Amino acid sequence: MLKVFQIVIDWSEVWALLIPISLLLLKKQPAVLKPVVFYVWIALIIDVVIDITWKIRTILPAKYNSNNYLYNLHSVIRFFLFSTFFIRLKQPFLTTLKKIIPFFFVVFVVVNFCFYENFFDYWKLSSRLLSVEAILLLFYTLQYYLFKINDHVDVNIFNSDFWIVTGLGIYVTINFFIFLLYNELTIRLQHFAVTLWNAHNISYIVFNLFIAKGFYESREQ
């Protein structure tokens, strides 16, 4: 039973995305949610390749059996699509800063992978990239709620963006320290690091459930 559970968790980065995608097949989403729609489809493609590469790594040529670069790619795409989503919400709060952050992220990615890390590193994904992405997305999430508080706007739980932002906030909050420390843990406490990734996968399931809820509630908008 435990083995079956582990298999389900191992593949959660793929099947969890099918939850919001099932809503997309039933209902067209409003324009403001298009970045999130693009995200779930692109993430599905990347995560399928990630998991298949991992599962058949023993039969792949050595130079092709690492999926670390795909996690880096997923991180970059997720940041740009969700930052675009927050900008398209058009909340009149920290507007300039929200538009500037993606440009700083581009500079960070270029400098980091030109001088400090290898985007296609065979042995490890970029903890630095994933943790910076998480903290920036957490900023976007927090400013969303600060706008609601400062403007005395009631948070409508039946609003699509509320569910999506909340799911993203849960995901990045749980995973910031996992991303930050993961490479060190794989070196010093490898078994613990593998087990800890289960927390990431479970939080990713929750994240996709919230996205699905957001897609479902879009009928109210």
Image (cartoon, rainbow, N blue to C red):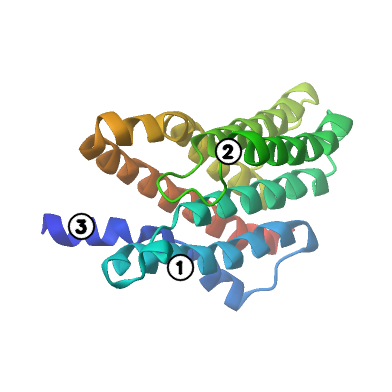
From the image, state whether disc 1 or disc 3 is nearer to you.
1
The relative height of residue 217 versus residue 105 in the rendered view (above or below) is below
Against 135, residue 213 (above or below) is: below
Q: Nearer the viewer, residue 137 or 30?
A: 137
- List x then y, in percent, for residue 118: 56, 44
Is residue 216 visible from the viewing direction of this image? yes
Name the amino acid type tagged 3.
Answer: Phe
Where residue 52 appears, x then y in whole percent?
Answer: 37, 69
Tag 3: Cα neighbours inside 10 Å, few (<14), some, or many (≥20)?
few
Tell me the residue that label 2 is attached to.
Answer: 129
Query: Which tag, 1 or 3, sits closer to the chain's start?
Result: 3
The quadrant of the rendering that contains the C terminus is bottom right
Closer to the observer: label 3 or label 2?
Answer: 2
Residue 122: image x %, image y %?
A: 43, 51
- Does label 3 or label 2 sit earlier along the sequence? 3
Quadrant in the rendering for residue 26: bottom right
Q: Measure the C-alpha gap from mark 2 to mark 1.
A: 20 Å
Between the C-alphas of marks 3 and 2, the distance is 30 Å
Which element carries disc 3, helix, strand or loop? helix
CB under 8 Å between discs 2 and 1: no
Q: SS class of the residue under badge 1?
A: helix
Q: Is residue 31 above or below residue 177?
A: below
Image quarter of the N terminus: bottom left
- Disc 1 packing (10 Å; few <14; some 14–19; many ≥20): some
Residue projecting furthest to the top: 150
Residue 198 or residue 23, whichever sits in front: 198
Residue that badge 1 annotates = 49
Disc 3: which residue: 5
Q: Is residue 198 left or right of residue 135?
A: left
66 on left or right of 221: left
Name which residue type carries label 2.
Answer: Leu
Which of the two residues, 164 or 125, is positioned nearer the viewer here?
125
